[in-house]
Image: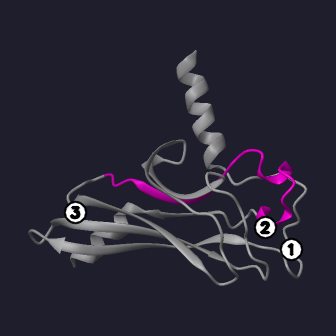
Amino acid sequence: MNRHIASISVVLLLLPISGLTCPEDCLEGQPNPAVISIDFNLVSRDTDSTGTVEIVGTVENLGSGTFDSAAGQQAVQIWAGPSLTSLNMLASQPFEDLAPGAQVSVSYELEWNTSNEFPPIYRVILSYDPDIYIDGNDDNDDCATSDNALQRDGSEINDLFT
């Protein structure tokens, strides 16, 4: 029973926040932290098919207002796994404030082998404290939640070795 509860918690954490009162069309002066990219970089090559790769997830405030929040209320995270329902967190980068156009990134390095027949899916998400929309601080209310996650297939990493 506890096993099912844990897996349900992970799925809920990874889905974009929905059903909130925050509008999906941002108004002037509202912050909009958004996951804008997941990059795969070759750090070093050991052989033609093995080496160290880096996964970098980047968040940018696409809104016109400054995202102004307290420590521990949000982070950008990298998750990986065989499917979207079975992911493990690899890295987390907490952040506080983001001016319009400012960015924050999280990265993770791992050993790679192109012979891996079933490479994982990588997902970068914005993770918020569950009470962030009711904490009385409008400056940390993300005005658009549909852009809070991106994913890429790990098979794309193999292209770094060609």
Residue at screen point 17% across, 66% down: 51
**Contact? badges 2 and 3 (CB < 8 Å):** no
Q: Residue 71: x, y in percent?
A: 62, 56
| Image disc number at residue 114 | 3
Residue at screen point 11% across, 72% down: 48
**Contact? badges 1 and 2 (CB < 8 Å):** yes
Q: Is residue 19 visible?
A: no
Mark whose residue sits in front, 2 or 3: 2
Residue at screen point 79% across, 78% down: 65
Amino acid at the residue labelled 2: Ala
Rendered position, 64 above or below 47: below
**Which residue is disc 2 drawn over?**
144
Residue at screen point 56% across, 32% down: 7
Dot 1, how many residues are within 10 Å of its Cα: few (below 14), some (14-19), or many (20+)? few
Q: Quadrant of residue 4?
A: top right
| Image disc number at residue 25 | 1
Q: Residue furthest left?
A: 47
Q: Residue 6: x, y in percent?
A: 56, 28
Label 2: which secondary element:
loop
Q: Is residue 113 visible?
A: yes
Please count the marks in the image: 3
Residue 73 drawn in magenta: no
Part of the protein shown in magenta:
118-144
- Specify the quadrant that holds the N terminus: top right
- As measured in the structure, the alpha-carbon distance from the residue carrying label 1 to the one carrying label 3 is 41 Å
Q: Quadrant of residue 98?
A: bottom right
- As measured in the structure, the alpha-carbon distance from the residue carrying label 1 to the one carrying label 2 is 7 Å
Marked residue nearer the N-terminal end (1 or 3): 1
Marked residue nearer the N-terminal end (2 or 3): 3
Rendered position, 130 above or below 121: above
